[in-house]
Amino acid sequence: MAERFLWAETLQGRTSRYTTHGKELADAYENVFAFMERLHAESMEIFAKLNDEDLKCKTPYGADITKWKWLRLMVEHEIHHHGQIYLCLGMLGVPAPPM
């Protein structure tokens, strides 16, 4: 969801549309995955339109950044959340699969 409403919007020169990640967006396993797949497809469509002529964008806080760095930060942000999940699983004594 952040991929689409934060990262993809920013790459288009728009403000973030990310507001929540609650049940009001989708509930039940099948609906959540359908929602996620739809937003991911929209993101990929936006990313595919990137070109070398327009190399910069602004972060949600107004800082200028190259688009490739912004996309790298998206991946780093996802890695951060993977780490959080592994930490929580470890605290609960639940074995986590290798990354």
Image (tube, rainbow, N blue to C red):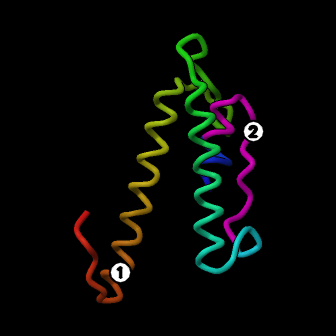
The quarter of the picture where the N terminus appears is bottom right
The quarter of the picture where the C terminus appears is bottom left
Q: Secondary structure at mark 1?
A: helix
- Amino acid, disc 1: Leu
**Lateral position of residue 88 relative to residue 32, left or right:** left
Residue at image point 26% right, 73% down:
97
Q: Residues within 10 Å of mark 1 (few under 14, many from 20)?
A: few
Instruction: Residue 50: give x, y in percent of width and height.
Output: 57, 24
Magenta stretch? 8-22
Q: Which mark is residue 15?
A: 2
Instruction: Residue 51: give x, y in percent of width and height.
Output: 56, 17
**Residue closer to the observer: 47 or 69:** 47
Q: Which mark is residue 89?
A: 1
Q: In terms of image quadrants, where is residue 78?
A: bottom left
Instruction: Residue 27: give x, y in percent of width and height.
Output: 68, 77
Of the numbered discs 1 and 2, the one sitting upstream in the chain is: 2
